[in-house]
Image (cartoon, rainbow, N blue to C red):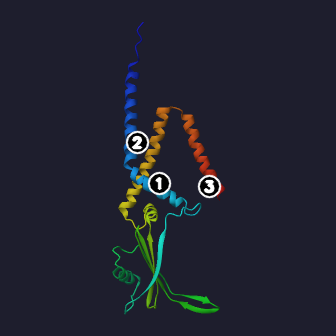
Amino acid sequence: MTHVQNPKILHRKPKRFQWLKWLRRTHAWVGLWGAALGLLFGISGILLNHRMVMKIPAAKMEQSHIEIALPEPLPVDANALAKWLQAQLSIDREPSKISTEPAKAVIWSGQNLQQPSQWRVSFHSPQQSVNAEYWVGNAYVSIKYQEANVFAFITRLHMGVGMGTAWVLLADALAGGLVFLSLTGLLLWTKLHGSRLLMAGLGLASLGLAVFVVLSSL
């Protein structure tokens, strides 16, 4: 007797295999696209993860502090101070932050004193930071300068310090790619290896371990 296969099964298998082939190719290309940035974010992520506990003494910021005399007449506001600092220090970027703290009354050694207004201006880039503080009425401005080494540079890239909208969107695209790789990786694993029970066990074990570590640190 000749065995005849169901035509529906014959049509079903090629479609499934084509879908898996497309999924594997897309998974591979997305992984290749994000490989270089993934390496950068991976290394910097390890350094950031160890910045408080089990410190890795790799990322360092060289610091220096100077005081610069202000011109006459003194800057009229924080924005004017920021423009003067840009010209004086040859800074080719706009301020990252300008803030002012109004004058207020304070108690010092049992006496009521009037504390003058304070202006703060910050310039940040992946390579360096310039933070200026000025008490209104002083003839000078205090400046703290920080310069990053190679490892501090890549951690600042990870955090987007001094970077613009384009870098933020690129990092978002990489994060989206990682989500896509995770989902397609799960699909490929279940379709190619078959054991959904084992997959669920591994996933729940990983999630349970993360929850346990978080709860134990509270």
Q: Amino acid at mark 3?
A: Val
Tag 1's secondary structure?
helix
Q: Which corner quadrant holds the C terminus?
A: bottom right
Q: Amino acid at mark 2?
A: His
Residue at image location 42% in from the left, 51% down from the top: 176
Task: Mark 3 vs mark 1: give the one in front.
Answer: 1
Residue at image location 39% in from the left, 42% down from the top: 28
Q: Which residue is mark 3?
A: 214
Q: Are the residues tagged 2 and 3 within 8 Å (C-beta)?
A: no
Q: Could you say which quadrant of the image residue 71 lies in?
A: bottom left
* Cα–Cα gap, marks 2 and 3: 31 Å
In this view of the protein, which residue sits in the foreground, 137 or 68?
68
In this view of the protein, which residue sits in the foreground, 49 or 13?
49
Q: Tag on residue 153?
A: none
* Cα–Cα gap, marks 2 and 1: 19 Å
Residue 166, image x, y percentages: 35, 61
* Cα–Cα gap, marks 3 and 1: 21 Å
Residue at image location 51% in from the left, 61% down from the top: 48
In this view of the protein, which residue sits in the foreground, 16 or 170?
170
Q: Could you say which quadrant of the image residue 72 lies in?
A: bottom left
| Label 2 or label 3, whichever comes before in sequence order | 2
Q: Tag on residue 27?
A: 2
Compared to 16, does 106 lie above or below?
Answer: below
Q: Amino acid at mark 1?
A: Gly
Residue at image location 54% in from the left, 61% down from the top: 56
Q: Which residue is mark 1?
A: 42
Q: How many marks?
A: 3
Tag 3's secondary structure?
helix
Q: Could you say which quadrant of the image residue 127 lies in?
A: bottom left
Residue 134, image x, y percentages: 46, 85
